Image (spheres, rainbow, N blue to C red):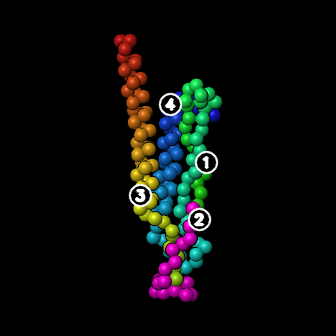
């Protein structure tokens, strides 16, 4: 792995959390969607993360994270009897996306905090670098 510096580490972590936030946004946007076919119902998305270690991790402790892929969660759609719904099947059922809005909100808050933590790392590093440069003046 070619991790260049702390900016690269924090940048990769922020990019991973951005993918996570995009997945949450897609899930929340489709939370109320309904179809007449259980096979065409929206399935929630989740990113899979992988820790990337530097070649010399035992000496320098450098590791970061990358998103390997975004996968669909295999959950059964929510079957509801609503014969008056325009998308209802011949038996009067609609199939809603199996999304737990509370779970998505918690995931969104956690991803947002992780993103903010990495911004704080970059801000702190910048301030320390400036203080170091001012020592010689």
Q: Main secondary structure of the magenta part?
A: loop
First along the sequence among labels 4 and 2? 4
Relative image position of residue 55 (x, y in whole percent): 64, 30
Q: Residue at x 49, y 48 (%)?
A: 18
3D distance between C-alphas at marks 3 and 4: 29 Å
User: What is the number of the mark on residue 12?
Assistant: none
Q: Residue at x 41, y 23 (%)?
A: 129
First along the sequence among labels 1 and 4? 4
3D distance between C-alphas at marks 1 and 3: 23 Å
Please name whichever residue, 29 or 97, is drawn nearer the observer in this view of the structure: 97
Q: Report which residue position mark 3 lands on.
A: 105
First along the sequence among labels 2 and 1? 1
Mark 3 or 4: the one toward you:
3
User: What is the number of the mark on residue 6?
Assistant: 4
From the viewer's perspective, tell me whether residue 120 is left or right of residue 41: left
| Element at label 3 | helix
Q: Which residues are magenta?
A: 73-92
Task: Please tell me whether residue 112 is drawn above or below residue 71 in the rendered image.
Answer: above
Q: Report which residue position mark 1 lands on.
A: 68
Quadrant where the N terminus is found in the figure: top right
């Amino acid at each position: 792995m070619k991790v260049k510096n702390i900016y690269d580490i924090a940048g990769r972590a922020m990019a991973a959390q951005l993918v996570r936030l995009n997945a949450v946004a897609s899930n929340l946007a489709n939370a109320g969607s309904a179809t007449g076919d259980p096979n065409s119902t929206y399935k929630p998305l989740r990113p899979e993360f992988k820790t990337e270690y530097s070649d010399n991790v035992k000496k320098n402790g450098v590791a970061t994270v990358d998103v390997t892929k975004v996968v669909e969660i295999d959950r059964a759609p929510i079957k509801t009897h609503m014969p008056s719904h325009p998308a209802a099947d011949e038996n009067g059922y609609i199939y809603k996306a199996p999304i737990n809005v509370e779970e998505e909100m918690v995931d969104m808050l956690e991803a947002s905090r992780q993103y903010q933590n990495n911004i704080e790392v970059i801000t702190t590093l910048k301030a320390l670098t400036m203080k170091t440069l001012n020592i010689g003046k």
